[in-house]
Amino acid sequence: MEKTTCPVCGFFTPNDPVCMGASDSESIQNAVDAASRCGVGKVVIPAVNARTGECRWNVDRAILLPDHIHVVLDNAYLRQTDGSMDNVFRNAGMYAPEWLTPAGEQTDIRLSGIGTAVIDGGVPNGLTQGTSEKNGFPHVRFNNPILLHNVRNFSVENLIIRNQRWWGMNLCFCTDGRLSDITFEADDSILNQDGIDLRIGCQRIIVERIRGQAGDDLIALSGFLGGDKKLAVEGKSIDIRDILIRDVMGTSVSKTLVALRNHDGCVIRDITIDNIHDTSVGSDANHPYAVVRIGQKMYSHTRRSEPGETSNIHISNIHAHAYHGILINVTLTESVIRGIFCDKNVICAVTTQVGEDVAEKAHIRNIVQGAFIRNTVIEDIFCEPGGESDRAVVELARWEDCDGEENVTVRNIYAAGRRDVYSDFDT
């Protein structure tokens, strides 16, 4: 690209003659590189693509984002090209020589939309968890529309992510950021169509005003040392902590709205989950098995999570319309669950087990249930009358010897005609 000067308007666009390349990805990347090089740090992708004359930008390779960059989708429609196997946006430092060291940390990356800004996964490309790194395929993470690793001070806001080919957003070792006003439009046509995934090392992040439908978990906090072990940053904690999730109005085809899972010594703590509305009411297609899930007795590689490693979790104002409000497995300590509002279709407001019928409908594999719960308050639960469930509102069941209760308080349950609490434990 020829030498550029900073534009008077204060930003570059891929329609600028100096940026226009042989493909849409090249044009956008040229604009990003020019904005970084001259110091304006801003790129605006408009609705109309001057190179093609269409209101569409076809992305066949990832747009690599440097430090101090703000990319704005101004009513723009970006679509992953059929057959492509790369992200739409990825931070430039990922896979660079120092990407697994503190020196490789990037900072100040912003993605935002104006109006109707869409990132569309298009049609499936054959790259799935089952084909990942097999027969010439790359890792399935290259299907994430947005992939960020080892980034500090970031934001992604006001975007629609449609037909994602795997998780919509994949963040690993990212800190001090905000994800807001994101809408997902997925139909569970591909395995694991999560919305937002915060993986190991993610800390001090706000996730707010999330809308729409995920095929799998809408928001997932996942700490395991499986494939993510290869992404570990030298000297950085693998724990997931200080995450605020609030104002979620959405659903999942069959899984959860918010899921917390951790094993292998990864700690999840200091998490606030507030004002979560399941919108599956009246929908024949959507039946999430829980609004919030804490723990799952699978996915461990070295050992399961131990008491104290999933702690200081504050959950409030949960509005449930499908099978369960809160599902707890493995461990939960030093936590509060407060304010669960259930319609008559909800089987249990809080439970440590899922019935075989629900598991089959939700396609939950390798069911191992039960939990150890300590120093936790469960209170202020309201159930709409007229339901058909014969199970207790709060159900604490033993499945393994390691399950148990210590200093658990359950109070203020309002559910006429139903048992308040069932427990397999004496405490």
Image: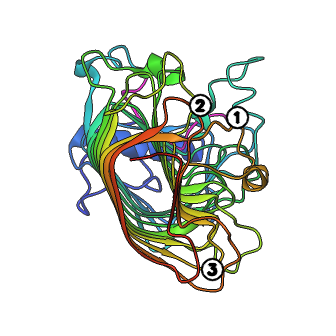
Which of the two residues, 95 or 51, is positioned nearer the viewer here?
95
- Percent x, y of residue 206: 30, 55
Residue that numbered label 3 is attached to: 344
Does 342 sit left or right of 45 as displayed? right
Residue furthest to the front: 426
The disc labelled 1 sits on which kind of residue? Asn
Q: Quadrant of the N terminus?
A: top left
Mark 1, other Cα within 10 Å: few <14 / some 14–19 / many ≥20: few
Residue that numbered label 1 is attached to: 366
Residue that numbered label 2 is attached to: 298
- Percent x, y of residue 178: 30, 54
Instruction: Check whether the beta carbons of the residues at disc 2 and disc 1 lie within 8 A of each other.
Output: yes
The main secondary structure of the magenta stretch is: loop
Q: CA distance from mark 2 to mark 1?
A: 7 Å
**SS at mark 2?**
loop
The region drawn magenta spans 85-94
Does 366 sit left or right of 110 as displayed? right
Mark 3, other Cα within 10 Å: few <14 / some 14–19 / many ≥20: some
Mark 2, other Cα within 10 Å: few <14 / some 14–19 / many ≥20: some
Q: Residue at x 74, y 44 (%)?
A: 82
Q: Which one is closest to the eye, mark 3 or mark 2?
A: 3
Disc assigned to residue 408:
none
Q: CA distance from mark 3 to mark 2?
A: 30 Å
Q: CA distance from mark 1 to mark 3?
A: 28 Å
Q: Residue at x 64, y 68 (%)?
A: 322
Does 185 sit left or right of 304 as displayed? right
Instruction: Check whether the beta carbons of the residues at disc 3 and disc 2 lie within 8 A of each other.
Output: no
The disc labelled 2 sits on which kind of residue? Met
**SS at mark 1?**
loop
Count the labels in the image.
3
**SS at mark 3?**
loop
- Percent x, y of residue 311: 31, 42
